[in-house]
Image (cartoon, rainbow, N blue to C red):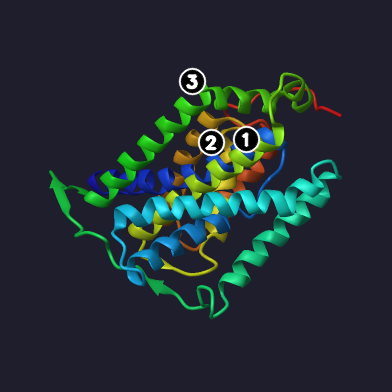
Amino acid sequence: MIEAINQVLNGLQLGLVYALIALGYTMVYGIIRLINFAHGDVFMVGAFIAFISTVNWHLPFYIAVPLSMLICAALGVIIERLAYRPLRYAARIAALISAIGVSLLIEYGGSLKFVFGPNYRVVPQPFSVVQWDLSGISVSNIQVIVLVTVVILLAGLQYLVARTKTGKAMRAVSFDHDAARLMGINVDAIISYTFALGSALAAAGGVLYSVAYPQINPFMGIMPGLKAFTAAVLGGIGSIPGAMLGALIMGQVDVLSAAYISSQLRDAIAFTILILVLLVKPSGLLGKTGPEKV
């Protein structure tokens, strides 16, 4: 029983990281109906920026994290402007192919020696790891930091979307681009802002992931990105609460399947869930079905 509780806590830690990536998928899809497959690679860039900032530039960790989020926000805007905006009114398959191309460009570009390099890097812990034993239940300060950081970021995101003028504009653009333009909303700026916000959250996820699992490489974003996408679909892509719920479920599935079924089958189980959701309830757990706009 104690071991199961410890595994659940590990699943919660991983699920919270997935949530930060899944939110980027779901926000971008909600705004422009695009699956940004390069999003997992922004997660990777965020981890590397924090690593370089602390190891090479000797910046404090509390500065490296917002710097990583800022740089990845700018990267998200650049990706949107160069790769997606010219194809906004093209066939969806064109934008999808562009997203896959951007993903491969970031991965293989990052593996060049003069960028990040192809080798695995061990991330030095920015602080001492402390383990607390609570009647056999093991809780680390890493888990607490991940939990507190993600809760703060999610609360800030929820406040921004629900309570601010920019959030209202995002919801309006998500509902109807043309109507939003007629109401004086700069649709292009809101879309760029959404990419920046989602990319900043992915960068935070990359930093937390590299702290919890201290090894990074240029291809580290592939599997977390795909599983976060699965989480977004599971919860209902386009729904922020759905992305959060799906990510928490995926974190538990990932850890518990590795612990009690097979570590080699954990990825297969995750993607089996994606297939089942698409077959049984394509709108996801909290998603809403509606007529397709043409």
The three-letter amino acid code for the residue at tag 1 is Ile
What residue is shown with label 3?
163
| Residue 82 left/right relative to 152 | right
Relative to 43, is 201 above or below?
above
Rendered image quadrant of residue 151: top left
The three-letter amino acid code for the residue at tag 3 is Arg
Residue 5: x, y in percent?
28, 43
Q: Secondary structure at mark 2?
A: helix
What residue is shown with label 1?
237
**CB within 8 Å, label 2 to label 1:** yes
| Residue 173 left/right relative to 228 | right
What residue is shown with label 2?
243
Please indicate, yes or no, whether residue 45 appears anywhere in the rendered image.
yes
Considering only order in the chain, which callout, 1 or 2, is on the residue closer to the N terminus?
1
Q: Check residue 74 in the rendering and tell me which mark sits there, or answer none.
A: none
| Residue 195 left/right relative to 97 | left
Considering only order in the chain, which callout, 3 or 1, is on the residue closer to the N terminus?
3
Q: Secondary structure at mark 1?
A: loop
At x 68%, y 25%, the residue is: 185
Residue 87: x, y in percent?
81, 47
Residue 271: x, y in percent?
60, 50
| Residue 159 left/right relative to 235 | left
How packed mark 1 is, by other alpha carbons closer than 10 Å (few <14, some 14-19, many 20 or more), is: many
Question: Label 1, label 3: how many angstroms apart (C-alpha)?
Answer: 22 Å
At x 44%, y 55%, the residue is: 68
At x 76%, y 56%, the residue is: 98
At x 30%, y 57%, the residue is: 61
